[in-house]
Amino acid sequence: MSQNNHIGESSIPVMEHFYTLQGEGYHQGRAAYFIRLGGCDVGCVWCDVKESWDLNKHPKLRVKDIVEDVKKTMSSGLIVITGGEPLMHPLDELTKALKNEGYEINIETSGSHPISGEWDWICLSPKKFKEPLQEILPVANELKIVVYHKSDFEWAEKFAAKVDSSCKLYLQPEWSKANDLTPLIIDYIKKNPSWTLSLQTHKFLDIP
């Protein structure tokens, strides 16, 4: 049997997949098909999808079945691979299969695992609980820092100094502290205009 006949036969744990709008960051407001993979070993205390952490709790779907589900919803457009921590899994086959169908593919990752897959856009959101690998910093298209404490501004600048000069820089208030932190972030951005404010608009709109 040829190698091409095996494409799409591998499986990967998927917590959920759905069609919605990208709610945050550079692509905010765009229609996007989200594929949320199960498994995460970063363990952010404020994570709003902690149910994704245990990869054994989520069904393993074949790559070709994932692609077919996407095609039933949209024939072209943006796909976002997220988690959990998606780079816990080898993603070359999934991204190749999706690219073969002409989709634009983005990833949202903490960067805590080696990069796999072919990406049109890499959103790096590093976490203090498990710092990103150095290899992802120069290829990140977007650096998105979730601000949970005032000390996170210094944390943000640490990585802003390491990414490529073309990388888009975002500061995003952690949702439960947004009322207190957003004014601080606005003041910080006014003093440091290389940064842009990111808000979780999907939560304001009450959409997935």
Image (cartoon, rainbow, N blue to C red):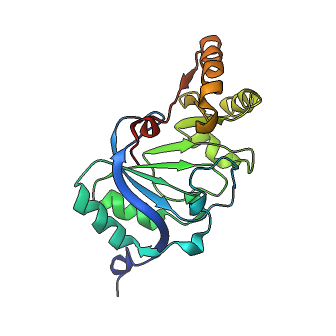
Camera-side residue of 204 and 79? 204
Corner quadrant of residue 114: bottom right
- The location of residue 124, given as percent across then percent down, is 58, 43
> In the picture provided, is 126 more to the left or to the right than 81?
right
Corner quadrant of residue 174: top right
Residue drawn at x 42%, y 74% as measured from the top left: 61
Residue drawn at x 56%, y 40% as measured from the top left: 140
> In the picture provided, is 49 more to the left or to the right than 161?
left
- The location of residue 23, given as percent across then percent down, is 43, 39
Camera-side residue of 201 and 93? 201
- Figure check: 26 above or below 16: above
> In the picture provided, is 167 more to the left or to the right than 204?
right
> In the picture provided, is 187 more to the left or to the right than 206?
right
Camera-side residue of 51 and 31? 51
- Figure check: 124 above or below 85: above
- Quarter holding the N terminus is bottom left
Residue drawn at x 65%, y 25% as measured from the top left: 180
- Residue most extreme to the bottom: 1
- Figure check: 123 above or below 34: above
- The location of residue 77, given as percent across then percent down, is 29, 47
Corner quadrant of residue 85: bottom right
- The count of marks equals 0
- The location of residue 100, given as percent across then percent down, is 31, 60
Camera-side residue of 11 and 102? 11
